Each structure stands twice: as structure tokens, then as C-alpha cells.
Image (tube, coloured by chain):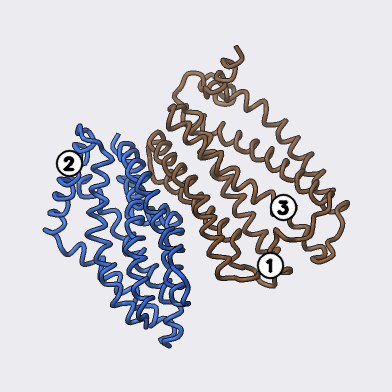
Amino acid sequence: MIAFLIEVVRRDLLLAVRRPADAGTVLIFFVVVASLFPLAGNPDPVVLGNIAPGVLWVSALLACLLSLPRIFSGDYADGSLEQMVIAPQPLSVLVLGKIVVHWLISALPLVLLAPVLGLQYGLQGEPLFVLVLSLLLGTPTLSLIGAIGAALTLGSRGGGVLVSVLVLPLYIPVLIFGAGAVVASQAGLEVQAYVMLLVACFLLSLVVAPWATSIALRIALE
Amino acid sequence: MSAINWFKYAAPQTFYPLAGRLIPWLYVIATLLALAGIYISFVIAPTDFQQGEAYRIIFVHVPAAWMSMVIYLAMAFWAAIGLVFNTRLSSMMAQALAPTGALFTLLALVTGSLWGRPTWGTWWVWDARLTSELILLFLYIGFIALRASIDSPQRADRATAVLAIVGAVNVPIIYFSVRWWNTLHQGASINMSSAPKMAVTMLTGMLIMALASWVYSIAVTFVRVRCIILERERHAGWVRQLEEVKS
């Protein structure tokens, strides 16, 4: 089963590497959205420091959301998804592999770029580190929950907007804990509780999401 | 064998006339309860010594907030039953409950903000309960939007069922995360759970209004289920035999 998982990840990574612009667009979206807030509001360093955790987290969340339909759309369009669903290997493992690739391609670059944006917002030292840590622990949950939404809206009308409506309310706990960790560290408080809650969200969604997504895929393809 | 009697009404064909017979009675009960509740809330219940007459909106607000949560759970329950046992009527119930639930959620939000104006001085506070109620409204809208985007009713039943179950798992997590966020940010705001003990008549009025909302919700859900049954089973023989369809 592990070999199967690795094979799925290898295949999807290869597909993604052959089309590097897709991942690049998500990254650029993240940067553009995050740079809009100082332009729309007040570029005062104190104000920026106050809004930084929320703005950076929401930008990352939206960028992640934007790339969700891509988890399944390619395989759905050329019909290979149907073959995968009837394959003897467990569908939830396949789904998990696709989620891993989505995280590697769409979310991990955001995490790696976040310190640069954090510096633009005047974050330094521990809050900056906590921002990266919270994104690192929170974005896998976003990919996992998002996959359910992507599978549910597969082949339905109004895909992209609908995914946002379905998935964004479910993202709220991750957003609260993730941005909360940065706020707490800015205030000099202990962030351990937030980190543990983020991990708890991740583990819970790791159990539920691949299973729910595979059910949703079967429904979409029946 | 009483069990068989219960399952008998799980078929749309038998449920349709049963619901039709129950609906007038449910409307009568709901109206009587609402009249009694309104009488108690406006005439018998005393004026609150802190909030004056403004508090009387709780007789609508609290039942609406209760209903919004109960209906979401009922909806997720019927959707799950429909997904697991593939029973047609269960999914129709889930579909019929959604608009009523969304309506009560909206009502709770609107009355909450109307109440907030005289007592807190603002139309909206990022209070934990108001915020989670708002998120609940988003969940309802997502459920309805997903159904609207899928043409095949059977596929829509099962897709929305998965969403409702995931949402029901998430509701407690959302509630507690919002509450935690709220206590961290807001400090000592007005805490309603520590409000002075409620007069017995106020509580009675609220409970009767809640009962009225329950009966009303069941009645309108039945009306909606009957419409859905007619729409989905329009090719079935028994639907064509109905008086209201023939004429």
C-alpha cells in the first residue's frame, strides 16, 4: 500500500513538474493578495504588524483554495479518474496521494515564501518563525478538507466559486488557531496550545478527509 | 409487529397522504402555541429591570437560534440515513429541512442584531454565538448551493449528504474555536450566561415559543416534502392517480 501511495505521488508530481506554471500562479496570487492590503489600508508599521497574522493567513488560505479544483480536474477530464476508481487498490490511499501532491505543489511553496512576506509586514524573530510553523502545520489540513470540496463539486456547474462556499466555513478553525498562534507570539505568550490544536485538526482531518473524499469521488463518477 | 408500521411510512407513496392529513393539524397546533407564547411574552412576562422592554425579542431570538441548530442536526441525520440505506424519503426530508433551517438561522441573526442595538449599542458584535450562527448560515447556504449545482437528484442527495456529515462533525469544532478566539480577543464583554436568573414566566414563554417553532418547522417541512415527492415521483403510477394531479 505504501508502494502504491509512493507511485501515485510520483506520477502526480511528475505531471505537476511538467507544467510548472500552474504552481507558480498560485504562489504569485499569494504574493499579490498579500501586497494589496498595505495599499488598500495604512502602511504604518504598527498597523501592519497588527493585521499581519490575519492577512498572511487569509492570503495563504485563498491561494490554497484557488488550486483545489486542480486536484482532480485533470484526471477527471481525460477519464483516467474513472479507471482509478475501479482499480483494485483502495481509493482513499490514492486520494491521500493526490492530497499530498497538492500540498507539495500548492501549499509548501507558500510556506517557504511566507517569511519574505512576513518581513514586508514587519514581523521579526519569534513571530516570524511561528508564522512559518503555523502555516507548515495548518496547510496540510487545508489540503485535506479542500479535497472533499473538490471531489463534491467535480463535474457540477460553477465549480470554483462553489468550492469556496463549501470549504471556507470548514477552514475557520484552522484559520483561528493558525493566525492565533502568530498573534500570541507577538504578544509574547506561549504558542504551544495553538500548535497542538493545529496538529489535532490535522490528525482528525487525516482520518476523515481521504475517506469522505473517496465517497464523494464515487458519487461524482457514478 | 409495530416495527413494520413505522417502516410503512418510509415509502413516499404512503407518506404523502399521511403528511397531507397531518399538515392542517400541525398548523393549528403551531398557531395555538404561538398565540399562547405571544400572550405570555407580551402580557404576562414582567419587564426586565436592566433591559426594559427590549429584552422581549428573546421570545423569537432564542427559539430561532435553537431551531437553527436542531434542524442542521436533523438534516445531517436524514442525509446520513439516506446515504447509508439509500432510502428516497430520507434524502427528501434532508432537502426539505434545509430552507427552514437557513431561514431560522437568518432570523436568529437579524433578531440578534436588532436586540444588540438597544442593549449593546451596536448592530453587530463579534460575539462567539453570533459568529458561530453566521458560520452555520454559511454551512446551510453551501448545502443548498451544492444541491442546486447538481442536476441529477440522486447524485445531489448523496453529495449533499457527505457535505452535511462533514459539516456536522465540524460544527462543534467551529463553535469551540470561535468561542476560544472570542474570549481571547474580547476580554470582559457582556456575558449572557451569567445574566441574572430568568423569571419563570419568561422561561415558560420562551419554551412555548420554541415548541411553536418546532411544530411550524415540521409542518412546512412536510409541505415541502410533499412538493418534492410530487416532483421526483411524477412518473410513478400512484402520483398520476392522485386527485390533485388529475385535475
Q: Mark 1 lies on which chain?
A: B
Judging by colour alone, the chain drawn in brown in this rendered image is B
Closer mark to the observer between disc 3 and disc 2: 2
- Label 1 – label 2 distance at C-alpha: 55 Å
Task: List x then y, in percent, for residue A79.
Answer: 19, 41
Q: Quadrant of the N terminus of chain A?
A: top left
Do residues under tags 1 and 2 come within 8 Å of each other at their CB atoms? no
Task: List x then y, in percent, for residue A6.
Answer: 17, 47
Name the residue carrying label 1. Answer: B190
Name the residue carrying label 2. Answer: A4
Chain A: give its colour: blue
Tell me if mark 2 has few (under 14), some (14-19) or many (20+) residues whose alpha carbon lies within 10 angstroms of its own. Answer: some
Task: List x then y, in percent, for residue B13.
Answer: 53, 21
Given the current orientation, which residue lies at the most extreme bottom position?
Answer: A44
Same chain letter for marks 1 and 2: no
Q: Which chain carries label 2?
A: A
| Vertical position of residue B190 compared to residue B148: above or below | below
Q: Which amino acid does label 3 sit on?
A: Val
Closer to us: A139 or B6: A139
Q: Which chain carries label 3?
A: B
Q: Which amino acid does label 2 sit on?
A: Phe
Q: Which amino acid does label 1 sit on?
A: Ile
Q: Quadrant of residue B125?
A: bottom right
Q: At numbered mark 2, what does the secondary structure look like: helix, strand or loop?
A: helix
